[in-house]
Image (tube, helix red, strand yellow):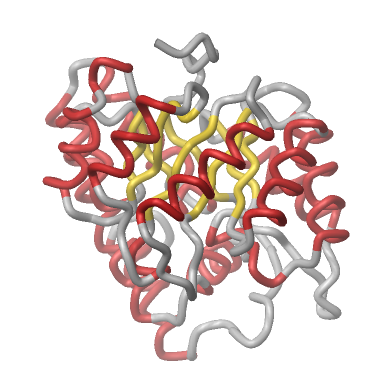
């Protein structure tokens, strides 16, 4: 059993979007305002540099600027996690150390994209990064849709049982059998599994997830958080109703190029976060109209 504290790893964690100016510089005022908005909306944690945080588009100097703002404005109100999506182990170690040295409570590591490493290579990759921040919890991030391959059950089980500070994961596979197995096979360790699909928050909680990482919490934090809160209050029917209210909104996002719809929804609802970073751009006018229509249908705007 790990001695690393993990009790705070739960609830709705937001892969926060990063507002930028037209020149693609960090908009500090808008970012600080957005942090307050999502915390006031009830989120239980902030993930820096998740997929919706456009981690791939910022250089390390910008990432340091962003993280300093996140830590400063959050001011301990909720945990901040350092998201890492780099390919090389060396760069991941550098980012992980920077994150925890500057106030992050833990680290989340996406499997390397572009490459397709063997399980042995992946084990060494994750273990070396975890060893570099050995006093902090590390979460694996399984996102086969973006990397082209999934973290296998045997690999995750080995990492969970052999690397003491690898204490959980975010599973964005959308395969609930896989999610269940990540939970079941590591139950002896109280391994913390977070659902990575906004449409499956309720389902994930039913099978033992401790929470979810949700892009939609960037613009509908109260609705998203209500799914989790109502479930904890044994109001399953109300929790499921909130999930069903969210689902059409989330599913419409898939018709935009990834991950621009999160920023589009923020802007539609008056939370100005600027444009996505190039080469992506905001959704077409037709898609923007459809995004707005889903909000109207849910009774969230007129």
Q: How many marks?
A: 0
**Residue 237: x %, y % from top left:** 12, 30
Which residue sits at x=68%, y=77%?
Answer: 277
Q: Residue furthest front?
A: 120
Q: Is residue 185 above or below residue 278?
A: above
Which quarter of the figure is the C terminus placed in?
bottom left
**Residue in the image at 78% along x and 26% along y:** 75
Residue 207 placement (x, y as % from top left): 16, 31
Q: Which residue is rendered at x = 23% and y = 55% of the image?
A: 174
From the viewer's perspective, tell me whether residue 116 is left or right of residue 131.
left
Pinpoint residue 235: horizontal percent, then vertical percent: 18, 22
Q: Position of residue 272 (x, y in %)?
A: 69, 63
**Which quarter of the picture shows residue 254?**
bottom left
Taking 246 as reference, is 210 above or below it?
above
Displayed quadrant of residue 268:
bottom right
Q: Residue 128's quadrant in the figure?
A: top right
Considering depth in this image, is 235 or 161 the residue closer to the camera? 161
Check the image and report above or below for 233 versus 31: above
Quarter of the picture containing the N terminus is top left
Q: Residue at x 48, y 90 (%)?
A: 284
Most foreground residue, 39 or 208: 208
> Foreground: 264 or 122?
122
């Amino acid at each position: 059993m790990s001695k690393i504290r993990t009790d705070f790893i739960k609830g709705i964690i937001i892969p926060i979007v990063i507002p930028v100016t037209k020149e693609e510089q960090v908009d500090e005022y808008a970012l600080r305002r957005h942090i307050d908005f999502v915390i006031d909306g009830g989120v239980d944690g902030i993930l820096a540099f998740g997929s919706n945080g456009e981690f791939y588009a910022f250089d390390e100097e910008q990432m340091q600027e962003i993280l300093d703002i996140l830590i400063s404005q959050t001011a301990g109100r909720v945990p901040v996690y350092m998201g890492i999506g780099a390919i090389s182990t060396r760069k991941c170690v550098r980012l992980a150390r920077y994150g925890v040295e500057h106030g992050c409570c833990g680290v989340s590591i996406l499997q390397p994209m572009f490459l397709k490493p063997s399980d042995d290579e992946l084990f060494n990759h994750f273990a070396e990064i975890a060893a570099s921040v050995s006093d902090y919890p590390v979460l694996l991030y399984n996102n086969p849709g973006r990397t082209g391959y999934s973290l296998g059950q045997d690999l995750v089980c080995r990492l969970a049982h052999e690397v003491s500070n690898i204490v959980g994961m975010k599973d964005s596979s959308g395969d609930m059998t896989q999610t269940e197995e990540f939970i079941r096979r590591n139950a002896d360790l109280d391994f913390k599994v977070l659902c990575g699909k906004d449409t499956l928050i309720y389902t994930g909680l039913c099978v033992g997830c401790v929470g979810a990482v949700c892009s939609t919490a960037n613009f509908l934090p109260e609705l998203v958080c209500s799914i989790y809160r109502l479930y904890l209050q044994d109001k399953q029917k109300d929790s499921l109703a909130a999930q069903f209210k969210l689902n059409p909104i989330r599913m419409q996002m898939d018709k935009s190029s990834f991950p621009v719809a999160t920023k589009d929804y923020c802007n539609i609802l008056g939370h100005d976060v600027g444009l996505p970073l190039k080469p992506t751009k905001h959704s077409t006018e037709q898609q923007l109209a459809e995004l707005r229509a889903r909000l109207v249908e849910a009774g969230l705007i007129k």
